[in-house]
Amino acid sequence: MQQEENPLNAYIEPGSIETPQQLDMAEAQKKAFLESVIPIDEVGDYLPEEDDPNVLIYGPWLERGGSAFWISTAGTGKSIASIQLAHAMSSGLPFCGLKPRGRLKFWIFQSEDSPRRVAQDRIDVRAELKEQYPDVDWDKTGTNVRVVRLTGKVGPAFVESLDALLREASLYGERPDVIVLNPFLAFVGGPVSDGAYVTPFLRGGNVDGLQTEGLQAVLERHAVGALIFHHTPKPPKDSDLDAWMKSQFPEYQGAGSADITNWGRSFVTMMKVKDHPRMVCVTAGKNGGELGWQRIGGAFRHYLAYSDETGVSGKGRHAWRDLTQEELDEVTGNAIKSDEELTEKAAAAIAEAIKAAPVAPLAGLNELNSLVDLPGISRDVIRKAANRIVANPGEFHLEVKPVLHANTNNFRKHIGQTENLHAAAEAEEQKRRYLNSMKGGKNAVCK
């Protein structure tokens, strides 16, 4: 028997009536879309950092869902710093000029030191802190500092295991505020110089044909911050070592992929101080301008010294202390004096090179840098030296003539020898060409 056609088909388009299940699915898809595409006014509110629960370390230097890198050479004391920072901040106290927002809970993922070494660092750090803050019960505070070992978990497997641990911790009210990875190299799951390993670990990506979540998604989901201790590459040769250790750009001193620099929100380096073997200089790079540290040698710096006391081993105590005012005056005075001496040497070297062969009118920092054959000279020192010559040319038996050109990224001054008529003639010729070019139109530029 032939089935009669439904007369409603003439008025209702097939498939236009949705079931309740289809409606629920469509609503869920819409909700997911709206959660991903948010009007800018609804992204968040700006609060003073002391009122913002997402700020973990003031500056803000570390926030929930954010990350910070602590970079140093092997054997300088990164692991001691990680344990001392966690102990101090678990009591709401500062360490190395970094101030926490209240008492923070730390999980330290340790994959470098043996349990015996961790115990030694713990005992020595607490002994040091007890002397600095005798009213704090440091043994009780230690319960807010946990050491976590995920043996054999690296790359995406580590991220997945971390996510599961944090989910479980939330059920028991034990979620940390900060996770510490020490060292970064041990968790990536491949060479840190290879973006194919680093980017999926940090941001997520395609690994062996599978889409994986990265560390960033886990930090945001569980509202925790990450403090990552990382190694430098092999230090340069002795002639360049001093400048490298005083670098103003800590974010570029960690070993590996550029995505480390791009992904991390804050960076410090910890380097030994020349002529002061028991001191280190901690330099703040990316996002460090808000810490309130003293600006020395073009960068924001804080100094620490190894403890002077005897540790549990009967040898030097594994702990850090702040410098006394006398020590600070000495080391910062030396740093400032060293910076001024380098600027003076660079200015003299540039002046002598100019006298031998005047530089081109459009010479920039790279060209000037090539004139100076001095170890340990940074671009910042070259810039200061050039500015010093321009400000006081007579001091170097030079004169400065203005140059008319359109390139605002290069020096607008022509540095020439007072007696050098050729340089003066060239400047006059350039001025003439410029004036002639202006006849061709308002926006004409010097050829």
Image (cartoon, rainbow, N blue to C red):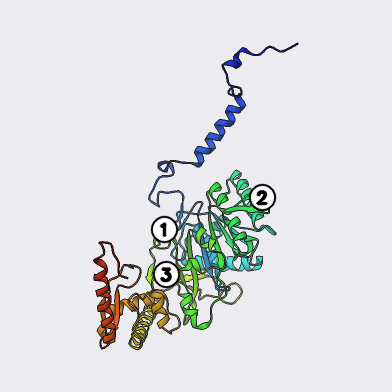
324 and 388: which is toward the camera = 388
Residue 54 falls left or right of residue 311: left
Quadrant in the rendering for residue 303:
bottom left
Say which residue appears at 59% left-offset and 63% top-offset: 184
Residue 426 falls left or right of residue 60: left
Tell me the residue that label 2 is attached to: 210
Residue 283 in view: yes
The answer to whether marks 2 and 3 mark residues whose Cβ atoms lie closer than 8 Å is no
Q: Which mark lies nearer to you, 2 or 3?
A: 2
> Which mark sits nearer the N-terminus, 2 or 3?
2
> The residue under label 2 is which amino acid type?
Leu
> Which mark sits nearer the N-terminus, 3 or 1?
1
Q: Give the spatial CA distance, label 3 vs label 1.
A: 14 Å
Q: Image height check: is 267 above or below 38?
A: below
Q: Image height check: is 167 above or below 340?
A: above
Helix, strand or loop status at disc 2:
strand
323 and 59: which is toward the camera = 59
Residue 242 falls left or right of residue 26: left
Residue 162 falls left or right of residue 271: right
Q: Residues within 10 Å of mark 2 (few under 14, many from 20)?
A: few
Residue 263's disc number: none
The quarter of the picture where the N terminus appears is: top right
> The residue under label 3 is which amino acid type?
Arg
Residue 59's disc number: 1
Tell me the residue that label 3 is attached to: 301
Helix, strand or loop status at disc 1:
loop
The quarter of the picture where the C terminus appears is: bottom left
